[in-house]
Amino acid sequence: MRRGADQKVSQMNTPDQTLVTQDRIQALLAATPKGLLIDGAWRESSDGATFEVENPATQEVIAKMSSATSDDARAAMDAAADAQESWARTPSRERAEILRRAFDLVQDRAEELALLMTLEMGKPLAQSRGEVAYGGEFLRWFSEEAVRDYGRYAATPEGNLRMLVTRKPVGPCLLITPWNFPLAMATRKVAPALAAGCTMILKPAALTPLTAHYFAQIMLDAGLPDGVLNVVSTSSASAISEPIMGDRRLRKVSFTGSTPVGKHLMKMAAENVLRTSMELGGNGPLIVFEDADLDKAVAGAMAAKMRNMGEACTAANRLLVHESVAEDFTARLAEKMSALRLGSGVEDGVDVGPLIDAKARDSMEALVADAVAGGARVVTGGKRTEGAGYFFEPTVLRNIAPDARVLREEIFGPVAPVITFRDEAEAVALANDTEYGLASYVFTEDISRGLRIGDRIEFGLMGLNVGVISNAAAPFGGVKQSGLGREGGAEGIAEYTSTQYIGVENPWSAV
Ligand code: NAD
């Protein structure tokens, strides 16, 4: 199934059809900033320490990054705090125009961003281009939202006061992002924070910092003033988070990542009573009713399961299929899964890239082994592939015991467990039987039933007859242990503002 290592790399879909050559890769890696961005300048870490970034398709080291220390974190905090007042006072139109210029630059440099993302994260180029389009949209959306920050002026019911209600930037923020969507998870935080008038310190994931560094340079090129956006990549996350979160000048932490790390950060945030936004893990159900259009359901399941090789918080983790259509659905799904081509994401025709690291690949093996030990049948896939890179075959499992780990845990890989239900009540009970509550998907041709499930399902997001629902204009976020707060939409900017009320003397009191 895997393509040969000597395969010619992709012909890119740019108007000039630029080939992804080794020269082009080397030039792009050389041009990407590898230092820390503090107060408008890229610099080395205070102790000169570095960490390496690997291409998960080849296991080659592709970059050495400066690794921020606690001193660097304090310098970044100083820069963000110093820049806060003037950035908050910058007219929102000016902030909007910087965001809009950044959006245009992301379009101009889309192929570079996509290639960097594929090199450090592994997803096929077509999917990286999709992320550039999605991630860029947050810049455009929040450039439009920046100037729509409405307040109100009203009389109290008693007539004794006038109420002046405005929204102010919350203040300097710490933004922490995961490795799976290296651009979109950064723009989804940076853009609303900038639009609201906040300064920030961004800490990208150490596995995939290059895309975020390239994006930060785009923000500088778009005219962002010094100190507004600071970037501190590091191999020691706590060396950054402890000094910054302990600093009284910090006002907010916005985190996307795993639930255990999110809980740890929430405890730290409590000390300083910080505002928090938490976009955490998921265990998404995808429900296929007996009246579903099975072509649509299989296509939706493929998209919801295999986008990003399954390494998405929105991934369909459990496929719940009505018993009358389960065999047909499983056979069709397995056929599509086994036809997918694995390989390095820069090669032509590749559908599935490597997982992010050896730990992720080994975790797929362990989940499949646990399910099989409990009686599950491997319909297709189930194994790692030989050779370099952390590849795991697209896998479909059936006859899974209810206590199998693959049903209880976030899989974060290309493994699709199919289980059955008898009626709507059982489908809802199974779907909600998890501590998570991020994304869910429902396939039925009965729209009333679909909306009724929407009422009953304990998830922040639901796709009705679609497998991909992320959009910059939509409020994205979870309930239960999937997190707090929303990113995108009108809600996304509100997360970075605090409401102030000024009680004004009744102008008629002296009359
Ligand atoms: P992770 O929790 O291991 O790491 C996320 C980020 O937190 C990284 O930058 C990491 O370096 C940093 N981090 C870890 N410990 C820290 C500490 N003590 N202080 C400060 N920062 C710390 O998650 P991951 O493996 O990078 O990402 C995968 C997880 O992210 C999955 O659970 C996935 O569901 C979740 N995710 C959620 C969303 C969402 O919107 N809800 C989106 C994407 C990913």
Image: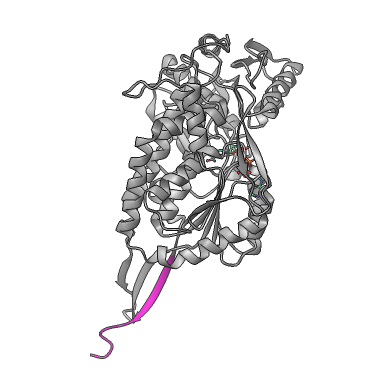
Compared with residue 50, is residue 453 higher up or lower down, i.e. above or below?
A: above
Left or right of 385? Residue 446 is left
Name, please, the residue furthest toward the bottom. Answer: 510
Q: Is residue 405 magenta?
A: no
Q: Is residue 502 magenta?
A: yes
Task: Using the image as rendered, state which of residue 69 and residue 256 is in the foreground.
Answer: 69
Name, please, the residue furthest toward the left. Answer: 511
- Give the quarter the ligand 1 occupies: top right
Task: Name the spot of residue 175 as percent of width and height, x first.
Answer: 54, 51
Give the residue displayed 63% in from the left and 15% down from the top: 398
For the question of whether residue 269 can be seen, the reply is no
Task: Using the image as rendered, state which of residue 24 and residue 181 is in the foreground.
Answer: 24
Compared with residue 237, is residue 242 higher up or lower down, i.e. above or below?
A: below
Q: Looking at the rendering, in which quadrant would you find the N terminus?
A: top right
Give the residue displayed 52% in from the left and 13% down from the top: 340
Q: Which residues are magenta?
A: 499-511
Q: Looking at the rendering, in which quadrant would you find the C terminus?
A: bottom left
Name, please, the residue furthest toward the right. Answer: 373
